[in-house]
Amino acid sequence: MISALWVMIALSVLLGIVLGYAAIRFKIEGNPLVEKIDAVLPQTQCGQCGYPGCKPYAEAIAKGESDINLCPPGGDEGIHKLADLLGVEYKPFGGDAQPKAKAVAFIDENTCIGCTLCIQACPVDAIVGAAKQMHTIIASECTGCELCLPPCPVDCISMDKIAEDISNWKWQHPVIIPIQAVA
Amino acid sequence: MFSSPFISQPSSVSQIMLRVLLALIPGIAFYVWYFGPAILVSLTLASITALVTEALMLKLRNRPIKPFISDNTALLTAWLLALSIPPLAPWWLIVVGTAFAIAVSKHLYGGLGSNPFNPAMIGYAVLIISFPAPMTHWITPHSVDGMSLNFAAQWSYIFSGMLPSGLTLDAVTMATPLDTLKTQLHLGQSVADIRDMPIFGRLAGHGSEMVAAGFALGGLYLLFTRIISWHLPVVYLGTLFAVAGLFHVLDPAHYVAPLFHWFSGAAMIGAFFILTDPVTSPTTQKGKIIFAAGAAVLTYLIRVFGGFPDGVAFATLLMNICVPLIDIYTQPKVFGKKGAGK
Amino acid sequence: MRTLFSFHGGVHPPTHKAESTRTPIALAPIPSKLIIPLWQHVGNRSVPIVQVGERVLKGQKIGRPEGKLSSAVHASTSGTVSAIDMQLVAHHSGLPDLCVTLIPDGRDEWISHVGVDVTHTSHAELRHLLRKAGVVGLGGAVFPSDLKTDAHHHQIKTLVINGAECEPYITCDDLLMRERAQDILRGAELLRELLQAEEVLIGIEDNKPEAIAAMQLAVTQAGYRNMEVLCVPTVYPSGGAKQLIRILTGIEVAAGVRSTEMGVQCFNVATAYSAWRALAHGEPVLSRIITVTGNVREAQNFEVLIGTPLDELIALAGKQADTNRYIMGGPMMGIDLPSGTVSVTKATNCIIASSLKLFPPPAPVMPCIRCIRCADVCPADLQPQDLYWFAKSNNFGKAQEFNLADCIECGACAYVCPSNIPLVQYYRYAKSEIHERSVEKLAADKARERHEYRQFRIEREKTEKAERLAQKERDAAAAKASFEAGLAAAENAQQQTINEAIERAKVQAATAHALNTDALTQEQLAKIAEVDARRAKMRELAATAGADDEPPKS
């Protein structure tokens, strides 16, 4: 009886030392989870999640302050990826925003008055122009976040859906008929 | 969407399974020849049960019935199960076994292509665990004691459990040769003495050795028409031979010759028809070899040291569990990544 | 005798080649209009350099290459450009792309063109000429040949010339080898020279004995050493570049590896032929040999101008009433074309008129039973049944792990599948999803970087602004201080001047005094001392008397 007690105590002490050592030895600096979550997010920086950009949203998710289903540009797949990453249940889209087709902002250069408000709104510096000068969008850098739309005083910015052509066309998941058909 | 390739080989699941069914016919013919037509009754019962269950399950699962019921896979399951249990077993035994095999071990796992276990073997396992008694009454072959039952008597026994007056169940049935061997060895007899008993033939059980040979014949047909690959049957029979041979050489009085193991029980039908079920066997060549060798060792161990009369079913099921793991660890090297100079 | 190697798997579909090899290559007439796509090659789309309404000559460049990976496009005959717009092109997507429509004038008038002396022209110049002539891989891959002839400093041992032509129905290379073996070999020799390869191996499937004989004869006649025509067994897909390289050299080129890194390069026979025509005769790629077969009255090979509409080409072979669609390329890897309005391109080696009888719609799809007939025939040693599973369940990471990238989409797996699963379609789907994701990932990384930089910039601007502000405040304070300091300084300066003046005066006085008293006699000194004493006495008396007396000024 006594000896068993001693063995258990010795074991717990030993394991405690091992665990304590491991905690020091393998200490992880920083919070890699935020980086991982941020890598899944689409980096549109649109703020539709309610956070000022993707990184803050990633931080909020990592802290458990925010849900994983608030990112419309990430789409359904993004939620699945986050669910996988965090080991939580998939949730359908929350909030009002719904995923939209990808688009690129376009400035109607005839209407633009060169107020620079959109330039200040663009999270990725994809608008060039100067005060009293016509502005234009660098289409290849535009994330389609739509943050430039509200500040424009003359409503000269529109969102152009990215049209499908040969260069961006992709194969569809094959549709297998007999599985759906009921004979 | 219509996309390449636009041509395909004229083959289908249904055709493949039909050929496998055809390959079973030599074995069935020998079965009828030595043990009477009772087996045809159980084959028919099993077939009808399988088709009805299949249709019912497809209906319940909201799947198209016609393409799946005509794929012949349910029939194959039924036949393999019918050939694994005693033909004189009461009619409900085969019905229950087949229904369980199709409904539970096939459709509840997702139907064709998704079942991890061989349905026929699941059916067998359920029967032998739930109803061990009727599973041990095997027909004595015609030529052993001359007291065989005619078709009418077999029919009436299967459906009503009545035997013609003057006959007892023990008189017309017996344990399988493997079972007899095991029992007699327990009683202290030597292998040589036991083999002198009238139920044994030249290689194994009288009659049943020829049935096994019939299955082997059908199996060779499948092998040469490339319906099945050589890996599973060759490695299985080879390993079984090697293990049995080793024990036999070390102690011939207690361990029977390897050929006896080949031609007894379900070894042949297992090697060519049960292990080779594509759905439940590994997909890689290395994996097939591991799978077959494992099944052979387990078969031998269960037969010789275990409590069941035959080991093929449990060996198959146990190896079925390992298939996903085997597949993962035996992935072949792909084109250009095999290392230089191959 | 050289030992040949083999690759894993392969299938033997019915070849259907005899139908189109009965007659020699016929020259297709100039069609009523030519629709010339500007994107006929791997890489960037060519940029049109002609105007609508402009008259162009045969061989005139109408599209210039854009960027390194691109190629030129030329007018196939003389005529007038009637449109530069989006037209349906031969592509899996069935989407339109930019095309130049040319109305031929029937005169077929060549632009002035001369060949070069290939032995006395630098390799760089020859490569440039290949690019200018729009020479791309005519086997179907349409990769710009000028880039393929650059070995990137790798030592090339073997140049493989691909005449295997393993796909059913297609016989254009067969006929080309039968009829134009000499020019093919000249082209091969030229490519060998460009690559500095040690040997040339020409692989032809053994179901083309006439082509093999013609090529062998041509090699002997021309006396090329280091050049060998090899007869390879007929098995699909032996004509895949990787597979043929494997058969002839034993080398396996994995996905993502350049074959030149392994000392081998591969060109199609038709590419070798057009490379020769382009360099030695100055003829750009304006036409190619196309097999017109399938559901037509007379299957035949035609030499067709690039841009010829399909309908006009099919009419030459005799269109059958029950033709329902066309297949461009072979039945294993071809493109489905629902209509005949598209035009032929440099990639078009074969047009198969299809009918329901010839190519019945695919049978219903059954579940996979893991029979691994697909794995048995896969020439890339893949496990198609696993890849199918991953692609179907959108598990793209796993698909990549199981080497989906090594799939050459040859279709052998789908050909043998007893469950009729459109396996290749699943792989294409998975591949294009993976591609899109990698593109998206790059874009996201870029956006992240730009966003972070912007935030850094805003932060920096803020600190800079704050600093400027602080500086300004400091400056203001300093200015005030300096003003006061200035005032003080001015006063100081005045005072100082005064002081200085006093000092100066003192010194002057002293000096003057000194001057006056410089050379005094003893007598005088005594006199002074007496006077001084007297004065001191007086001062003393004055002080004691009430100090009303001014101090004496000296």
Image (cartoon, rainbow, N blue to C red):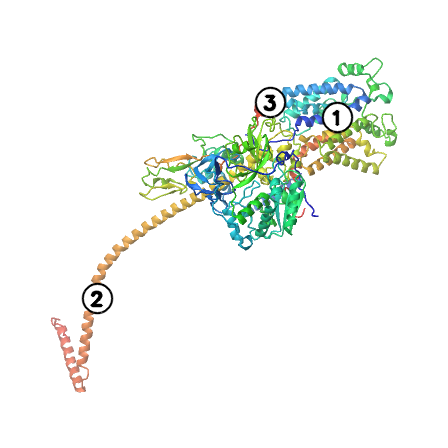
Which residue bears the numbered disc 1? B24
Is the residue marked by circle 3 packed among few (<14), some (14-19), or many (20+) residues within 10 Å? some
Tell which tag, 2 or 3, sits nearer the viewer.
Answer: 3
Across the whole image, how many numbered discs are drawn on residues? 3
Q: Position of residue C483 (x, y in %)?
A: 24, 57
Is the residue marked by circle 1 packed among few (<14), some (14-19), or many (20+) residues within 10 Å? many
Which SS class for mark 1? Answer: helix
- Subunit that carries the residue with mark 2: C
Amino acid type, mark 3: Arg
Q: Is residue C308 above or below residue B65?
A: below
Q: Quadrant of residue B219?
A: top right
Residue A28 placement, left or right of B79: left
Tell which tag, 1 or 3, sits nearer the viewer.
Answer: 1
- Subunit that carries the residue with mark 3: B
Q: Nearer the viewer, residue C204 or B122?
A: C204
What's the CA distance linking mark 1 and mark 3? 29 Å
Q: Quadrant of residue B80?
A: top right
CB atoms of marks 1 and 3 within 8 Å: no
Q: Is residue C273 above or below residue B190?
A: below
Which residue bears the numbered disc 3? B63
Which SS class for mark 3? Answer: loop
Amino acid type, mark 2: Gln
Amino acid type, mark 1: Leu
Q: Which mark, by number, is residue C496? A: 2
